[in-house]
Every structure is written in C-alpha cells, then in structure tokens.
Image: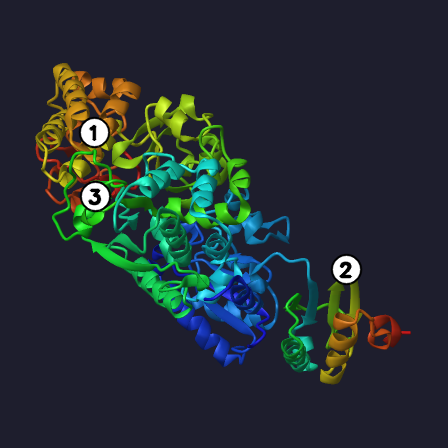
Amino acid sequence: MKSLAELAKIREEALKTVDVRMDTKCTRVVVGMATCGISAGARTVLTTLLEEAKIRNLNDVTITQAGCIGVCRLEPIVEVYKNGEKVTYVNMDAKKAQRVIAEHIVNGQVVSELTIGAVEK
Amino acid sequence: MDFFRSHVLVCGGTGCTSSGALDIETKFLQELKKHDLEKEVKVVRTGCFGLCEAGPIVIVYPEGSFYSRISVDDVARITEEHLLKGRIVTDFLYAESVEDDEIKSINQVEFYKKQQRIVLRNCGIINPEVIDEYIAMDGYRALGKVLTEMSREDVIDEIKNSGLRGRGGGGFPTGLKWQFTYQAKGDQKYVACNADEGDPGAFMDRSVLEGDPHALIEAMAIAAYAIGADLGYVYIRAEYPIAVHRLEIAIEEAKEYGLLGKGIFDTDFNFDMEIRLGAGAFVCGEETALIASIEGERGMPRPRPPFPAQKGIWGQPTLLNNVETYANIPQIILNGSEWYASVGTDRSKGTKVFALGGKIMNTGLIEIPMGTTLREVIYDIGGGIPNGKAFKAVQTGGPSGGCITTDALDTPIDYDNLIEKGSMMGSGGMIVMDENNCMVDIARFFLDFTVDESCGKCTPCREGTRRMLGLLDKICEGKGTLEDIDKLESLATTIKNTSLCGLGQTAPNPVLSTIVHFRDEYDAHVIDRTCPSGVCKALLSIVITDECIGCTACTKVCPVDCISGERKGLHVIDQDKCIKCEACIAKCPVKCIVKK
C-alpha cells in the first residue's frame, strides 16, 4: 500500500461488492417474479437488467424482485422507484430492459411508451 | 466483477456455527446452483450478528430480511420463494420483525434499535475473510491518515481527548497508557493485544476477532506508529479456533496488500504482527502473566511496578490493550475525538459491548452507549426475563464483579456508577438472574471458577479462595453457621488486600456483593436450613402431596427406588435415599410432587 489514493481506489471497487447491504437512498428496480411473471419471461428481463447494471457500473441501483404485482396479463412488469416516484413498465423483454436502464436509470428520461399508462390507453 | 442483486449473509460466529450455520451456507450454495441463481445472489459468511438466541441467523439484503433459527430444511423454501420469486418467507422471519402485516428490516428490530455500533459496526455486515470488504467500510483509511497526516504526538492527543478507557475491565485511560509507553526509553518497543477473554459467558472479543479482524490489525498498527514499535503480538486463547483462523487470514491479506510489512503507505513505518496462542488460563488475562506467557514462561503474574509500559515483553516497553479497546481506535481517528467524546457519560466515553446471558430472552451480544440504564438493557434490548419470572439481580464483571439488584436498575451504566453500586464493568459479561437463582450458589459458582484458575503463586489467593469455597460448600450443604458468614467476610477482606494480582484481589467480590445484597438468603441457609430459591440440593426435600393418584409413574423413573406406595394409593418418598434428581417431578401427571 503506497498511498491514500491507492486505498481509495480499492475502496471504490470494493464498495460495489457490499453496497447492497447498506441503507442507501438509491434507485430501486423491481421485477415481478411470481409464477405469472416467470412464465411470461421475467427471468430474462431480470438477468438483462443485472447484466446492464454490471456493464455500466451502476452501484447506486438495487435490482430486486417482487411477487405478483396484480396485472398478470401485462407481465413481465418492471417497476422503477427513483426520486420518490414510481414508474411501472409492462410487457417487458430484454430489449426493453436495456432501454429502461439506458434512458431512465442512467439519463433520467422515463421511457413513456413502455409504461402501463401508454400501453393501456 | 459480477453485479449481485441480493446478498445472503449467513452468520459464521461461534454460536451460529455450532448450531449448523456452515451446513446452511453449503445448502444455500447448492440451492442457488439448482435454480441457476449463482450469478445473481451472493452468499457471504459474516461474523456474529449479536442476537445469538435467535441463531442460526440468515439476513437477506437489500431487503434486510432477518431470518432466525433457520435449519438446513428451510433453505430450499427461502431460495425458491424469496430469492427466486421475491416473496419474503414470513414464517421464518424473526418474530418481532413481522408486525401488523408489515415486515421490518433487521435494523428496526427492538434488539438493535437502542444499540449504537462502533466496535461491532462491521460484525454481521462484512465477510471477515475478505480484506476488500473491510476497506469498503472505510477500513485502513485511519491508518493511512495517521501515517501520512499526523505526528505521533497528534495521535496520542487524539486518543487522550477521546476519553477512551480500557475495555478489558480496569478502565484505565487508553491515551495515557499510550503516552507512557511513548515516553518510555527502550531500543525496541512492542504493542500487544490481550485477546485472552476468560470470563465465563463473555465473548465480546471473540466476536470482534471473528467478525472484523482487520479492525484489530489496523488499530495495532496505529498504536505501533504512535508509541514507536514495529512488532505486535496478539495473545489469543486456543479455545477460539474460528477467531484464530480468521485473524491468521486477515494478517496474510494485510501483508499481501502491504498494510503490514515494510514502508507502509510509502513512509518509513514498518510493522508486523504475530499470534501467540494461550492455553486458556484465566490468569493470563492479567497483563504481567500474559507477557510471561508470550515469552514462553509459565503464565504467572509478577508485582507491578514496573508496569509493562516500562518493562513488558522481553523487558522492553510494551503497550498492552484489549481487543475491544483497539477496535475503537480507527473510528476515533476517522471521526475525531470530539465525535467519540460526544457519546457516553461524563467520565465514560463511547460505547461498551456486553455479552448478555443467563435468564434473559435475547441472549447475545449488544453494544450500547455508556449511560444506558440497566433497565433498558434488560427489558428493552434483552426482552425481559423468560417465563414470567421476577428479576432478581444482574451480575457484571464476571468472577471479579458483583451483583446489581432491582433498586439500581435505573443506574446509567458506566465505569464509576457500577463500582459505586458494588460491582464493576469488567470485560462485559452480564448475567441476568431471576427468582429461581440461589445467590449463595452463584457466589459458590464464581469462587469455584477462581479457585480452579488461581495460578498458585501467592498464598492469599491459592489458599484463601479455597478456604472460602470450603465455607460456601458447607453453607450450601446446610451445615453452615452464622459464624461462617463472618469468617467469609474477614477472609475476603484479607484476600483482597494481600493478593498479588487482580485475580486474587477481586476473587472475593461475588461473595461480598451477594452477602451485602442477599444477606437474607445466606441467613436462610444457615439459620432455617433452607434454600429459598430451591437450588441447593442438600437443603431441599422432595415430597408427594395428598393429591397423589397412585399411578406409580414416579416409582418407575426413580433411579434409586426410594418411592414406595400401593397402586391407587398415596406414595411416599424415602428422604434418606432420595438424591433429588427431580426425575419424578418431571414425570408426575398430576403435578403433585413438589420441592420444599
């Protein structure tokens, strides 16, 4: 160990491995993973989200699953909690999941056409 | 690096390990593999979470779901329901964390709410065998700061200003100790850590070593820099295999990262550490005996002065602190002495870790700010006394301490208040007793321990404690007299005044303190020849009351065949033959056999 900077670098890397365990006020991405969700392909959505988060080094994002959200016909469903606001994306797939990460999570632009409001209009 | 969406923390402390935590960990790995979740969910073995009563404990993040008393059979359901489908398995959650249909995270549970974790901050959160996780929690930043930004005097001043006092029991101001060792003249100085935790029922130091071993390494390096040492010894008992193993791993990791060795942080500071295993003698917790043992001598104390700060290991100035004291150091350096001094009471700063045991709901390890009252500890954090029994006393300070009774429950806990109440802080054992504990028997238990552990070097301790034990045995057998109680008191005073080391000087404390607070129980033993709590077997008789239905169940379990009576008739116990094993009491279907 040569300097505080070197230590800080290790710390930054290491934080990514433990931040799931902290109470951070970060963005939460929730995938509906009940039987309905899984049979509609929620696992692919979940793994894509994880993959994207890893590629983009997103360490202030929690990706987790929930049970049945209730509108099973619109599964797979992904809910994004950011800045106290909830956005529900429906009929998700891997491609759409990539868009949500890139546009909503990273750039803060809600992907309006994928939300439940747009689909159900 | 993989992005894990969920972490499963399995407690790997000694308590949970002995109740099967390692099998649970293996099972989780198998189940995750089965569901193809290995790349999404990470299993981490951590140190102790503190609530050993509820073990084996599993915590799932990011939710912070607190699963308690998990068995291997439960793992499949948690994996399938929670980790795969995202439905928390409420059946397995710690009961208090499910309330009004709302699931609380571990930090909101009553047991943790009143605690403040400085020493145990990483225990149960990080994997103690991975140095990166410690670094993520600000680890080694204090060492870096000290080496690159602070002079040795600055460090000592910071510790002095923090008001930290030795957590091993004595409560000597840590900063002063550092200053004395810094000022002492010697060609070679040493830092040493007392990890020879010997009080029955105390496991604070073990948990720190098992849950956060790098905190000790960092603190010892800081201390070494401050006093001018380049070698540290950790004296740890061989009965703590998990702690030893993790400390060994931690030392290796620190060496690989260049946090131990030569030229740390590119300065001219060198520091290395060695582990010395103790054979588990209580007396080796005494500093001069510990030093003798490190040197390979028989572990026996010698008179002080000279203190270790002048003449310690190999006759050189040595700084000796206990594990918990060290574990505070990095946080004091990082957050400043003012922050530390803002926690606690006037003369006792910071927090203290206690091992809560005995007749208490939440057996386990807690860390509270100094000044918390005993009532808060026992009823709020500890959850009160099980089975609706009445609180009688709490024993602090282990075999060197004393009892604190109901009238002192609202005393804020700190070094001085506990001494004023006739006990002491000690290293942090806290044993709760209810109405079913006989205080004479408790005194006898602790004295029995010190008699065994006396090293035999000085006569008052070697002979005196043995004579005291003899008197207590006599009282417990119902052969004592009032004179014996006086003899106990006079022997106790002599032993306290004339023993060589702390072991002998404090050994009579449990006896003296129980005589002061529970004189009526001693009197009952010697005058009425009864044991009011029904513990001392010789003073008990077990009798069958008139409600006996003559079922003969008791005669079948009696190991000495001392119960006689006709079928459907009243049975009688032959008091001369009865060994008071109480097997008949357990067997009687109509509960008509009672202790008198």
Q: Amino acid at mark 1?
A: Gln
* The disc label shown at residue B505, or none: 1
Image label count: 3
Q: Amino acid at mark 2?
A: Asn
Instruction: Give the x, y percent position of residue B185.
Output: 27, 43
Q: Nearer the viewer, residue B261 or B502?
A: B261
Q: Residue furthest right?
A: A121
Mark 2 falls within which chain?
A: A
Q: Is residue B53 left or right of residue A53?
A: left
**Crowd band around label 1 with a 10 angstrom C-alpha radius: few (<14), some (14–19), many (20+):** many
Report the residue marked by disc 3: B282
- Element under disc 3: helix
- Element under disc 1: helix
Report the residue marked by disc 2: A83
Mark 1 falls within which chain?
A: B
**Distance Cα–Cα, label 3 vs label 1:** 14 Å
Rendered view: A23 above or below B595:
below
**Distance Cα–Cα, label 2 vs label 1:** 62 Å
Q: Which residue sits at x=66%, y=82%?
A: A44
> Of marks 3 and 1, which one's residue comes earlier in the chain?
3
